């Protein structure tokens, strides 16, 4: 299975101390160089940077810059989003992890299967890795960490899992 990620789902999972979920769910997650740089050089993510650098199931990949640049110019996405979508498209990824609406829209236009942070939490619940309480706590943590998750989305997510 080929799973590619943008920075935001990784940051959100780290904020909720749930980055570990990606290994049992997907075995390996590929991140483009721009996503790696965003996670490891941005001072806002100093705590998260060490987790990414030391993570055995995250692998940094090179991207065809021509494709990524064309996508970025056409859609106004940032470099990490553009590289993640370009790599996922060029390599027929099974899953693209991305939260941003504009990026998700661009990815879906290329017929990519997109899963966001909420989707990862729901998938982990389906697989028996998280209880409903774990998901509730993760969503609460993400909301408190200002991860831009609205109440409607939280209520939707909770309606999808059993009590």
Image (spheres, helix red, strand yellow):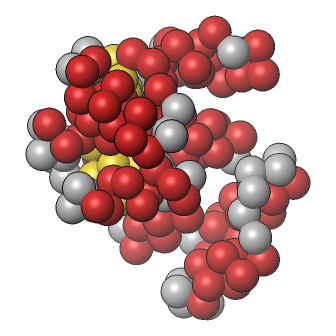
Can residue 124 be seen here? Answer: no
In the rendered structure, the answer to whether residue 113 lies left or right of residue 2 reads: right
Q: Is residue 143 left or right of residue 40?
A: right
In this rendering, the count of numbered labels is 0
Look at 24% across and 21% down and name the residue there: 66
Residue 7 visible? The answer is yes
Residue sitting at x 52%, y 13%: 37
Quarter of the picture containing the C terminus is: bottom right
Q: Quadrant of residue 58?
A: top left
Q: Residue at x 37, y 54 (%)?
A: 106
Q: Residue 115, percent across and down? A: 41, 59
Please tell me whether residue 113 is drawn above or below residue 145 in the rendered image. Answer: below
The outermost residue toward the right is 144
Front in this rendered view, residue 87 or 137: 87
The picture places residue 53, in percent across and down from the top left corner, at 50, 12
Q: Is residue 10 above or below residue 115?
A: above
- Residue drawn at 44 percent across, 45 percent down: 75
Where is residue 117 drawn, in percent x and y? 54, 56
Find residue 69 and report its image quarter.
top left
Q: Of 22 and 96, which appears nearest the observer?
A: 96
Furthest-front residue in this view = 74
> Residue 129 location, x and y as percent?
46, 61
Compared with 71, 115 (above or below) is below
Relative placement, left or right, of 147 versus 35 is right
């Amino acid at each position: 299975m080929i799973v590619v990620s943008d920075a935001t789902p990784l940051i959100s999972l780290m904020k909720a101390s749930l980055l570990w979920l990606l290994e049992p769910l997907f075995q390996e997650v590929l991140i483009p160089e721009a996503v790696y740089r965003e996670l490891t050089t941005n001072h806002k993510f100093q705590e998260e940077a060490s987790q990414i650098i030391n993570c055995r199931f995250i692998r940094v990949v090179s991207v065809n810059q021509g494709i990524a640049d064309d996508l970025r110019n056409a859609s106004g996405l940032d470099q990490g989003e553009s590289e993640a979508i370009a790599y996922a498209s060029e390599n027929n990824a099974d899953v693209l992890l991305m939260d941003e609406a504009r990026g998700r829209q661009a990815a879906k236009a290329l017929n990519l299967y997109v899963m966001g942070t909420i989707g990862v939490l729901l998938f982990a619940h389906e697989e028996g890795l998280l209880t409903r309480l774990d998901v509730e706590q993760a969503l609460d943590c993400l909301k408190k960490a200002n991860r831009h998750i609205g109440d409607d989305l939280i209520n939707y997510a909770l309606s999808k899992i059993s009590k």
